[in-house]
Every structure is written in C-alpha cells, then in structure tokens.
Image: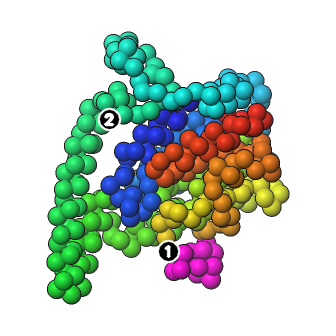
Amino acid sequence: MQAIARMRWNVSQSTSKFASLYGSSCAAIILTLSCCQQNETTNAQSAESSERKNAPPVISEQKRQNLHLSNTDFSSNLTSQKYGKAKARDKILYRIFGKDLPTPRILTPDDPLFDTPQMRRGIAQRKRDEKELESIQRDIMTCVQLNDRKCIETNMQRVSELMYGKGVTLQVREDFLVKYGCTPYDDTILDKILSFGKPIMDIGAGNGQWSRALQNRLEEQGVKVMNDYIIAYDNGSAIPLNTEIYHKFTQPVKDYFYSVQTMDGVDAAKLIKNRGRLLLLVYPPPGDMAVEVVKGYAEYPGNDL
C-alpha cells in the first residue's frame, strides 16, 4: 500500500504549519484506488468530462485483481504486522538500486522518502516560514495591545499570503473552504470515484463537500441511485468552518454541504451497513486516524482493497 506511505507523509509534513488553524494536512486519498490528488491552489480549475447516460460501470473482477492486493492478504498484514522503521539495509538498496522500501512502515525524519532535492528545499522553506509566522504573531499581539484593528487586519493578511500565496485574502480562503473543504475536487476525480459503481462511505467528511459534489455529479449524469448511496461521517474534531456561522439556513450549506453523520471514523468503517462500500478519505487529520480506519475497514474480507 504505497498510498499509506504517501498518506502518512502528507499528514506529517505537507501543511502542518497551519494545522492549528484549519485542521490538518492537504491530501485527497481514495484508498480503494490507491490514488492521491493533491492541489493547494485556491482557484482550482474543473476538468471537462464526457457525460454518461448510464450508471457508472462496475470494474471487472479480473481488473480488480490486477489493481489491488487480495482482501485476505492485506487485511492480515494490517491487523497482524507490527509497523517498523526502514532498516539500514533497505535504505542502502533503495538508494543504489531503487528497490522499494517496505510498506506500511513508521516514517522517521531520516526516511529516504524525505531525502529528495524538492523535499529538502521544501523543509528549508518551511523553517523560514515558521520563523516569519512567529514574527507576525508577535506583531499581532502588539496590535491587540494597542487596540489597532487595521494593524491586526494587515498582519492577518500577511499570514494568509504566507500560507496560501500572494493575493489570497482571508475571504478568498474562506470561500474556497466553503466550496471544497480542505482539498479541491474536479470532474475527473469525481468520475474516477464513481466509475467503480459502488456505494460510498466518506469518512472524515468535514462538512461533506466531496459527498455533495459526488451526489451532484450523479444527478448531472442522470444516474438514479438509492438515497443512502453516499454516506458521510465526521466526529467534528477538525472542521475548519464555524458551524455556528454556517448553519442549515445559510446559502453555502444549501449549495455545497452534505448531510454528515457524527461518528468516529473507525466505528463507521466497521458498521455492518457499510460493508462492501468504497472507502473515501479526503484530507485526513494528523495522527493515526487514517491508518486505523483502513485497518477497521480491512477487517471485513468483502471490502475491496
């Protein structure tokens, strides 16, 4: 499961510098597809996709076997294997011959996954950004003491541009979160998810923007499905938008949000009614939540991994 290694990297490193403000890392991971879509630009462009007149095709069993590990083997690996660090021998073989490292494994700062020119530059930039954020924080505290609202707004804009890019205001970021949640979708990835022709459980769904987008995509294609074809869950611990502001009578909720059931992700993955569903994890929070959800999901042999 290379997706798990990529997932744990995204969770631990990608955007942890603003996790305290907006939740966690920025990664969209469809575990049943071993597919990651990562995009941190606010102005996400939707890709054009051909319309389907019929229901999404069900992938053949032969193709499933070619794409995925067997359910039994993977379930047994997740439940019985003790995660370990990459050994020195594995690292040497990886560097010299490009041999795959064992997965899943515990990622440490010296893991070869992080030892690339791009990663080194990114980590160095992150350290510079963190120092700048600390400086801005001190400036904001001074502004607060002086009761200078204009000063506070100016420094908050500095924070926004440092984290999201030049010209990205707090309002632009808020609008982005309202429509997409923490990671943008487009027609291509929505169609890929629906192409498996299986009911979906969206765990860690936040306000349910991805579930709503999938539902809308089905309606655009004229596909009729049961009411609970897509079920969304979230325990409410890391939702970036204030639910007191965005309540059920507001327009953003009507346009972009979905009905999300409050439940722990691991518990939801183990529900009998969710057996056989496609597992969707988008922007999982820091920690072991994503891995524990996959382990719970893998306990049922009928789930496709």
Label 2 crowd (10 A; few <14 / some 14-19 / many >=20): few
Prevailing secondary structure class for the magenta stretch in the rendered image: loop
Residue 141 picture location, percent across and down = 20, 75
- The residue sitting at the bottom extreme is 147
Label 2's element?
A: loop
Of labels 1 and 2, earlier in sequence is: 2
Disc 1 and disc 2: Cα gap in Å? 34 Å
> Residue 281: within the magenta?
no
Foreground of the two, 148 or 272 = 272
Residue 74 lies left or right of residue 240; in this view the side is right
**Pointer 1: what residue?**
242
**Pointer 2: what residue?**
109
Magenta stretch, residue numbers: 243-255
The amino acid type of the residue labelled 2 equals Pro
Residue 142 picture location, percent across and down = 16, 78
Label 1's element?
A: loop
What residue appears at the point 46 percent right and 19 percent down from the top-left corner?
100
Q: Nearer the viewer, mark 1 or mark 2?
A: 2
What residue appears at the point 24 percent right and 85 percent down from the top-left corner?
149
**Looking at the image, residue 128 lies above or below residue 6:** below
Foreground of the two, 169 or 276 = 276
The quarter of the picture where the N terminus appears is top right
**Looking at the image, residue 256 lies above or below residue 185:** below
